[in-house]
Amino acid sequence: MLALMVWPLLAGASCKKASKDPEPSADPQDIVKAADNAHKTPGAGSASGSAGSAASAQPAVKVDTTPLAGLDMGKLGDDKKTIFYKLVDSLPSPCGKAHSLRTSYNEDKTCKRAPFAAKYIVALLEDEATEEQVKSEYDIHYKAGKTYQFKLDGVPMAGKPDAKVKIVEFFDYGCPACREFKPMMDQLLKDRGAQISVYYKMFPLPKHTNSKSAAKAALAAMAQGKFHEMHDQLFVKDPDEHAHDGVVAIAKDLGLDMAKFQADYDAADARVAADIKEGDGDDVDSTPTLFFQGKKYEGPMHPLQDAFHRNHGLQCGYCTPGMIMAASSFLQENPNPTEEEVRESLEGNLCRCTGYQNIVASILDAAGQMATQG
């Protein structure tokens, strides 16, 4: 439910830092093939030297056209079927496992998303998507996201310290988007403060001249138990007032010990630099950037919204929101439902826009996705 509440928060503008050239990385499809080969032929990876060279010179492996049991591909022509079989052997498991989609579909009964992922590929090919377009869409919806670890000791925070849901925000006091986002975060804390903990990481962008000074002032105020008061005032004040003299004036208004404030302000350079370094290493490229449970917030869709979209479970503007909210409450109570239990949960939701089969499929798909995400 939390993600459903916050998905609109970052759908707007953000403040970007200078981009970097991406570093080359291994092809995910090569990794999937290697994992499947190791799974099928244990010990095969031990060959080396001339044997390895000979293997690399062999022609490409023939496409495995063994059908996936229970999957309807009746609307696909032979060319599309060939593309499908190539994809299910090359795309990774939708559950983050170290094998292909085909292996998940055929052998991994715990991966509830595999049947929906296979059906999604079929639907895309039926809609005349190219092989590259299918790969792109699959990555968006099923690629396992990176999990980040943060140093949180001594970091300013709000909410419940031992909450199960942890949010880390990298922000910049001079960023207009951060200023617009703050009331939304404040409201979230007001509504859900007993269920979440929010940690504030300083990420002043070089283009905002006074942002580093503001960050140092916030940390210096934290040393006297007044982080949130300073935090609020810094967003009230214009960024032009965030230079040294401006933040000193705020500190005086807050009744801080000025000698201690100045000493802590001067000492905060190292802490701000550490936050920036951590953000750079954790793929922060704009402010505000949020991480939920170590996962970077990349887009606006909750797993239920994503599943309704992919499984064609969307209806009119009146029915869909109610269905999604009802499904969200249901999955909170029953995160691992059967199809019969899903249908029973929907009995009170009457809608004439469409049939219920795609809605049921959407909820089951979302349940699998949410289980994968923990």
Image: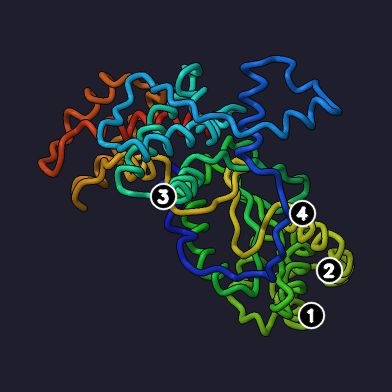
Please say if the residues under marks 2 and 1 sit with CB atoms less than 8 Å apart.
yes
Disc 3 to disc 4, C-alpha distance = 39 Å
- Residue occupying image coordinates x 68% and y 55%: 283
How is this picture coloured?
A: rainbow
SS for dot 3? loop
Q: Secondary structure at mark 4?
A: helix
Q: Which residue is mark 4?
A: 278
From the image, tell me which residue sits under label 3.
Answer: 130
Residue 315 in picture, x, y percent from top left: 20, 46
Counting residues from the start of the chain, the first of labels 3 and 2 encountered is 3
Image side of residue 7 versus residue 256, left or right:
left
Please state which amino acid type lies under the numbered disc 4. Answer: Glu
Q: Are marks 3 and 2 in contact (CB under 8 Å)?
A: no
Left or right, 338 with reference to 41 = left
Residue 334 image point, x, y percent:
38, 23
Residue assigned mark 2: 265
Circle on res. 244: 1
> For the residue marked with disc 3, what is the amino acid?
Thr
